[in-house]
Image (spheres, rainbow, N blue to C red):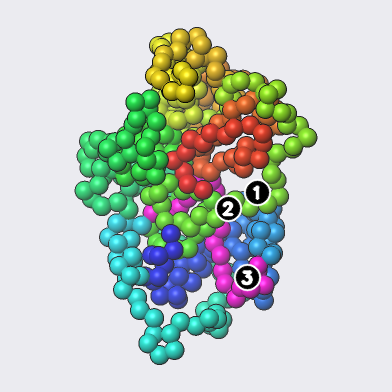
């Protein structure tokens, strides 16, 4: 993630940071500046981002244990769930090659200290109109999303087919290589299976390489991943409300909203959460499974009714990131389950975490519980 930055002069990196943070008055940019000054964090709130004060406070809390080691610098924190930096393939390749070709100075070698504060680092970020931010929200933008890949990659070929041999399905449908499966390059079919790749809901992108810190991303983006600040103030897990494993319900449980992307009539059928819920509640064929006989696991088949009883997965909210007609259609076909407090989840043995608009805010709570967590994600966090 950091290597391409070595292909840029430090002054160019600082300039791009100023430009991004100076776009704060652009509705929807959501970039919070965390400025390190005199070994303290100075947040820069955003007028239209209602959580930016809280976001800045959480960022301060997150860094308080090590900020006294840092020199003055500007950090760009992306307040959105979705990432933002997509470098064109030729630009990315050029930066990576420049980074590999960089050599430390022969005299003296690398220094075990920070440079002096550069003269172009200012204490007040001025408004800037040249940040090169573009909204591609609510539209089908697959070709723009995969611009960082080589032109001959499966994702950029017209009518390209999924490169399934890179990850390979086993007899029961399990993946042999999850890393290859998460590589967007290998799956041109993603716009038909995942909401973010169909129509991202609030996506703002830039082809300019700035060191933007985001909480999650698919592999096509060049953001720098860091832990979400909310983990430092809200674990989302109350051990007093958890129960012992033997007392939990023997099902896989999931509740969540249709926050997968912008949905249109019929288009929501391509989104991952809706597809999953619809499939698990409409099992009509025998399901291939594993059955242990003695010390050997053998393939077997489960009756549809028995398979359906293993799942308790429902949609609990239809997102406003949708056309009115699509909201009505999803409500009719998916049904709306009652909202559940997260502390109710611990009644089930198996809990699922599925991509939403971006990273999941619940995964760490699931890991802390006495239940077993499964994660289904194209986003890396």
Percent x, y of residue 187: 32, 38
Horizontal side of residue 62 vs 220, given as left or right: right
User: What range of the chain is rendered magenta?
Assistant: 66-86
Q: Distance between the residues labelled 3 and 2?
A: 18 Å
The mark tally for this picture is 3
Secondary structure under tag 3 reads strand
Q: Marks 1 and 3: CB-CB under 8 Å?
A: no
Q: Marks 2 and 1: CB-CB under 8 Å?
A: yes
Of the numbered discs in the image, which one, if any, rests on residue 227?
2
Percent x, y of residue 34: 61, 64
Mark 2 surroundings: few (<14), some (14-19) or many (≥20) residues within 10 A = some
Residue occupied by mark 1? 231
- Is residue 167 visible in this depiction of the protein? yes
Percent x, y of residue 66: 65, 67
Q: Is residue 163 above or below residue 89?
A: above
Percent x, y of residue 254: 58, 27
Residue occupied by mark 3? 36
Q: Earlier in the sequence, mark 3 or mark 2?
A: 3
Q: How far apart are marks 2 and 1 (CA)?
A: 8 Å
Q: Distance between the residues labelled 1 and 3?
A: 21 Å
């Amino acid at each position: 993630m950091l290597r391409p930055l070595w292909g840029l002069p430090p002054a160019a990196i600082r300039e791009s940071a100023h430009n991004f943070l100076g776009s704060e008055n652009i509705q929807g940019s959501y970039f919070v500046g965390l400025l390190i000054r005199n070994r303290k964090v100075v947040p820069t709130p955003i007028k239209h981002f209602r959580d930016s004060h809280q976001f800045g406070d959480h960022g301060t809390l997150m860094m308080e244990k090590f900020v006294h080691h840092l020199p003055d610098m500007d950090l760009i924190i992306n307040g959105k769930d979705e990432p933002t930096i997509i470098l064109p393939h030729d630009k990315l390749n050029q930066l990576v090659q420049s980074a590999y070709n960089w050599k430390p100075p022969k005299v003296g070698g690398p220094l075990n200290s920070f440079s002096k504060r550069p003269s172009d680092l200012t204490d007040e970020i001025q408004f800037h109109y040249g940040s090169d931010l573009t909204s591609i929200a609510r539209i089908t933008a697959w070709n723009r999303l995969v611009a960082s890949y080589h032109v001959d990659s499966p994702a950029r070929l017209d009518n390209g087919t999924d490169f399934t041999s890179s990850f390979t399905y086993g007899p029961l449908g399990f993946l042999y290589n999850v890393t290859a499966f998460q590589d967007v390059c290998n799956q041109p079919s993603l716009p038909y299976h995942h909401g973010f790749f169909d129509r991202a809901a609030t996506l703002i992108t830039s082809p300019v390489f700035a060191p933007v810190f985001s909480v999650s991303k698919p592999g096509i983006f060049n953001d720098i991943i860091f832990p979400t600040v909310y983990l430092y103030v809200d674990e989302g897990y109350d051990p007093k409300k958890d129960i012992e494993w033997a007392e939990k319900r023997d099902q896989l449980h999931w509740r969540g909203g249709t926050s997968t992307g912008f949905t249109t009539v019929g288009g929501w059928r391509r989104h991952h959460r809706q597809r999953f819920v619809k499939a698990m509640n409409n099992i009509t064929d025998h399901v291939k499974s594993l059955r242990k006989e003695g010390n050997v696991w053998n393939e077997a088949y489960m009756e549809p009714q028995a398979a359906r009883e293993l799942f308790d997965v429902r949609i609990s909210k239809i997102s406003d990131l949708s056309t009115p007609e699509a909201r009505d259609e999803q409500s009719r076909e998916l049904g709306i389950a009652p909202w559940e407090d997260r502390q109710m989840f611990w009644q089930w043995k198996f809990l699922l975490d599925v991509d939403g608009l971006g990273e999941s805010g619940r995964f760490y709570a699931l890991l802390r519980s006495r239940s077993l967590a499964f994660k289904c994600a194209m986003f890396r966090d």
